[in-house]
Image (spheres, helix red, strand yellow):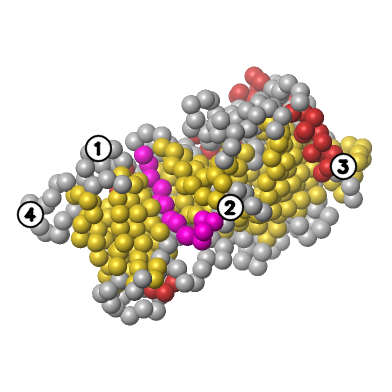
Amino acid sequence: MLTPDRRLLLAALSASLLPPAARAAALAPATRLGPARDFSFADLVARAKKNASQPYKAPATRAAQILHGIDFDAIQKIKFRADHQLWPERTYPAAFFHLSRYSAEAVILHALENGKAREILYGSDYFDYGASGLDPRRLADLGFAGFRLLEARPKVGDLLAFQGASYFRSSGQDSQYGISARGVAINTAAATAEEFPRFSEFWLDQSGPVVSIYALLEGPSITGAYKFDASKNLNNSVVMNVHCDLFFRAGITRLGVAPLTSMYWYGENERRAAADWRPEIHDSDGLTIWTGKGERIWRPLVNPPQVQTNSFLDNNPKGFGLMQRDRDFADYQDDSAYYNKRPGLWVEPKGNWGAGAVQLVEIPTEDETHDNIVAYWRPDGDTSAGDSRSFDYRLYWQNSEPAYPKNIARVVATRLGRGGIPGQNPWPRDKEKFVVDFSGGPLAAMPVRFDIAAVASASRGKIDNAHVLKVVGTDRWRAAFDLQREGTGPVDLRLFLRLDGKTLSETWLYQYFP
């Protein structure tokens, strides 16, 4: 997961290029490239496989003392010079990130065209150090921290960025960074320490309409060869096809494939945790799953009292993701972080992924600087040294799940409060009320009626007074029920809507902590 410092660094991404006037005044030459060398993905796979048979060598940090002094304030003052962009004439010019205390391990970058790779040669003149107080002469041999692909037309924004460990991200449909993806997750929230392999080397190819990125993964327990093909669709979503070949140096207790990393502090379902004046603060508000058997699941995120890992067993899943369903400004009242514009991230497996589980890790947090949510696919079966696995999947960086079925209503809000009847005195202190709003699908054009059933169940305790009503003046239908609590442990809740034996909605799952 991201550290607080790294999350602050990501917030400064949009300020890392020189302003237009400074760009026009820049006189330095374009990106410098090394000699051409042959490249193929097959060779990259062979290299990753060979590396897995050899001991891991941790990367050396260059100018460690200087980098430690490049904190959040300093990195904001260091601007990449736009005249050093790679492919400035193409649809997605590439810019580069400076090393800092938060991202101190240099990566090797290559420009790739027609099967020939040329290393992008670093120089401190790629950056304007401005008021940072740093001497560029002492930074001549640092190397780059990563790269970003800019959207030059029709507006200046970002397509995507790779920086730090195996993290990468896109600003999605509304040009606002939020959720991140990773190449792989190893032992997240397990009994052993989490491992963070890194992309140590990249090859960038923009010879066609799709941007291709190749990456070498290196870590103490694993190596890998990755290919990312990224483009924008007609909905302005960033779509990325991913292929990876993984090779294991050692056995891994908990392997996470297609991991997603996000932030959730509190939402409308956890008003008691709202220490801030803003109504909600989160990059994502729920985990969504499309199971191999076709069931649609929505699990609102929570800020738990202790680290929680929940497994949703499945076989050959059709998809899963962390989404931001609350998309109105009024949900957040935040005119700087713009949480309402943060993209969701949907994973569409390609091929048969077999048996395993979507795992959701939720970590307690007291502010918005921590990325405390992780979701990934954990395949069944142990891994041992010498093993290999391959995976293919597609990522959608957009505001909602792709191709959501028109015949299923979705959850649009979850709220909790004290049980019983409003105004009842005394009110039952052993009951909690759950109110879940649904919208769309078969409910969209349905007139008011009173025979829709709220099918609710609990892992402990008793469900009482379950009912469904249409919210007057809206297209929402509201299911409500009371939970009579038993014990002090967490309660797993399940709810869906049914009419005449037919399922009308996705399945709402919730983990409640009394």
267 part of magenta stretch: no
**Nearest the camera: 343 or 374?**
374
Q: Mark 3 sits on what residue?
A: 39
Residue extent of the magenta highlight = 290-304
Quickly name the residue at label 1.
488
The x and y percentages for residue 116 are 90, 44
Rendered location of residue 7, percent (x, y): 53, 38
Disc 2 versus disc 1: nearer the observer? 2
Reading the chain from its start, which is encountered first: label 1 or label 3?
3
Label placed on residue 425: 4
Select label 1 or label 4 by which is in front: 1
Which residue type does callout 2 highlight?
Answer: Asn
For the question of whether residue 420 can be seen, the reply is: yes
Image vertical order of residue 357 relative to residue 124, above or below: below
Q: Which quadrant of the rendered structure holds the C terminus?
A: top left
**Image location of residue 385, percent across then percent down:** 68, 27
Q: Residue at x 40, y 68 (%)?
A: 503
